[in-house]
Image (cartoon, helix red, strand yellow):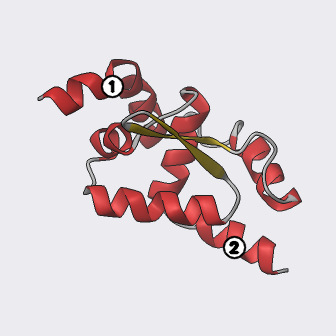
Amino acid sequence: MKNFIKVMKALSEPNRVKIIKMLQQREHLCVCEIRTVLKLAQPTVSKHLQILEEAGLIVFEKEKLWVNYRLHSTGASPYSAAMLMQLKNWLNETPEITEIYRLLPDIDRKDICNS
C-alpha cells in the first residue's frame, strides 16, 4: 500500500501533473525549461521533481551541464506504470494543459540559460 499512496500523493499536486504532461510531450526536460513553462522558482520545481522521482514516475540522467528528466519508461511500480499510462489520455483538453502544449515547442534550454 505504501507505493500506491506515494504515487497518489505525488499526483495530487497540479504542478506535478503538469510536469508529467510536459514530459509526455517532450522526451526530456531540464529544470530551467520546466521552470519557464510553469513560472515557478527553481527550488520549487526541483522539489516537485524529487517527489515525482521518489514515486517512481520520472527518472533523471546527467548530460554534461544538464540534468535531464524523463518519464520512467515502465514505472517503478505497477501503480506508477498504470498512472503514467492513464495520464496519457487524461486532461489533454483542459486549458492549463493546452497552454503548456502551446508553449513547449518554443522552449529551449540554450535560449533560457543564455539570457
**Residue drawn at the location 76% of the way across and 52% of the way down:** 83
Q: Residue furthest front?
A: 64
Give the camera-side residue of 68 and 107: 68
Quarter of the rendering containing residue 79? bottom right
Percent coordinates x, y for residue 29 in the rendering: 46, 35
**Secondary structure under badge 2?**
helix
Give the left or right position of residue 74, taking residue 71 as reference.
right
Q: Is residue 49 visible?
A: yes
Give the camera-side residue of 17 and 3: 3
Give the camera-side residue of 41 and 39: 41
**Residue drawn at the location 61% of the way across and 59% of the way down:** 53
- Image quadrant for the N terminus? bottom right
Quarter of the rendering containing residue 3? bottom right
Q: Residue furthest bottom?
A: 2
Residue 14 sits above or below residue 98 on the image: below
Q: Amino acid at mark 1?
A: Ile
Alpha carbons under labels 1 and 2: distance apart? 30 Å
Instruction: Classify 10 Å Cα crowding around label 2: few (below 14), some (14-19), many (20 and above).
Output: some
**Residue drawn at the location 46% of the way across and 31% of the way down:** 98
Q: Where does label 2 land, which residue?
A: 6
- Please give the label number shown on residue 107: 1
Question: Counting residues from the N terminus, which is met first, the one under dot 1 or under dot 2?
Answer: 2
Q: Residue furthest top?
A: 105
**Residue drawn at the location 22% of the way across and 23% of the way down:** 111
- Please give the label number shown on residue 82: none
Percent coordinates x, y for residue 101 in the rendering: 45, 28
Q: Amino acid at mark 2?
A: Lys
Give the left or right position of residue 93, taking residue 32 as reference.
right
